[in-house]
Image (cartoon, rainbow, N blue to C red):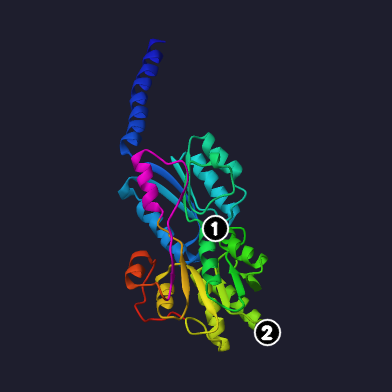
Amino acid sequence: MKKRVLCILVILLVASPLVLFAGGAQEESGMIKVGIVNLPPEESGYRQANVEAMNSVFSKENGYDAKQTNTGDNTEQIAAAKGYIRDGVDYLLISAANASGWDDTLKSAKDAGIKVILFDRLIDTDKANFQAALVSDMAYEGDMATQWVLSLGLDKINLILIRGQMGSAAEIGRSAAVLKAAGAGKLKIVADGTGGDSWSLEEARKVVEAAIAAGKDFNVIYAQNDGMAQGAVQALEAAGISHGKSGKVKVIGFDFNRFALRNVQAGYWDADMQCNPRQAAEISKWIKSGSLPSGIQYQKELLLTTDTITDELIDQWGINADPGKGVITR
């Protein structure tokens, strides 16, 4: 009997320090555990820059144990978020494919003591369901772009609207002002299409091709990202329709890819609306400071035209590779 008691005591004394040591090693590591739910980099140049920034900032070198899931499927995104909640992350960062359907997942994260930070775009949920959001004001972007269209001084505005992923915060915000202007009779939407869930250049080109084939008369293309604006202009080129500063059709894109800004500078396009993808560094500052803001924080963004664009602004605010001044990306 004494031998058995002695054996149990030895096991407890040996095992306990091991458990304590394992916990201590995790605490001493100082790694902050982060789960990132994002869209795929293939979606757009904007998203490529955004994904790269998240990977660069939330790295082991910067003190993070982070994983990033990239999918444009809302159901897959929610499943990934639930997985990160089960993993016990400290922070859950979300850029949602669709603005709806997140309530239960966000409440689960809150109940687990996980801080939820939205980035890039908002979710349609009660503000109590997330700690903070650092986002582009998509409605403001839409307002700015629509005001630019209305300021062109055209006798009549016949506009082709090319939306992004339907139901996304970006699509809703960028569509709202132009739809309101159409409802007020300030412009006419002669074709209303989408680049689909992937904001596809090819799908955008098909929207414009269909409008041309149907004999639609239009003088503005309002494309909700730069890739779709590129596809739209390809359709114009193929049909021999002039565009840009001295052309019939005025073209505006969104996102501030440097190739798009160079197109604006060259007068090949007319304007581009910024959507800043660099939220990662600011969010990291919040986390490292130990003092997270509450509620929605909006990024300041610009609209540049052929008259206001400069090399300095392209260098400062553009994203992704710069083809160089005077180089047109068709």
Q: Nearer the viewer, residue 36 or 210?
A: 210
Q: Is residue 302 magenta?
A: yes
Q: Pointer 2: residues within 10 angstroms few (<14), some, or many (20+)?
A: few
Position of residue 253 in the picture relative to residue 23 (left or right): right
Marks 1 and 2 sit apart, C-alpha to C-alpha, by 31 Å
Residue 260 can be seen, yes or no: yes
Query: Of helix, strand and loop, which one carries label 2?
Result: loop
Label placed on residue 139: 1
Give the residue pinned by disc 2.
Answer: 215
Q: Where is residue 203? Give x, y as percent.
A: 59, 73
- Relative to residue 161, is residue 67 depicted above or below? above
Question: Magenta stretch containing residue 104, yes or no?
Answer: no
| Residue that appears at 32% across and 69% down | 312
| 149 left or right of 12 in image | right
Region of the chain picked out in magenta, as a range: 279-306
Q: Residue at x 39, y 55 (%)?
A: 55
User: Looking at the picture, which amino acid does disc 1 mark?
Assistant: Ala
Q: Is residue 165 visible?
A: no
Q: Residue at x 52, y 76 (%)?
A: 251
Q: Secondary structure at mark 1?
A: helix
Residue 104 to residue 143: above or below = above
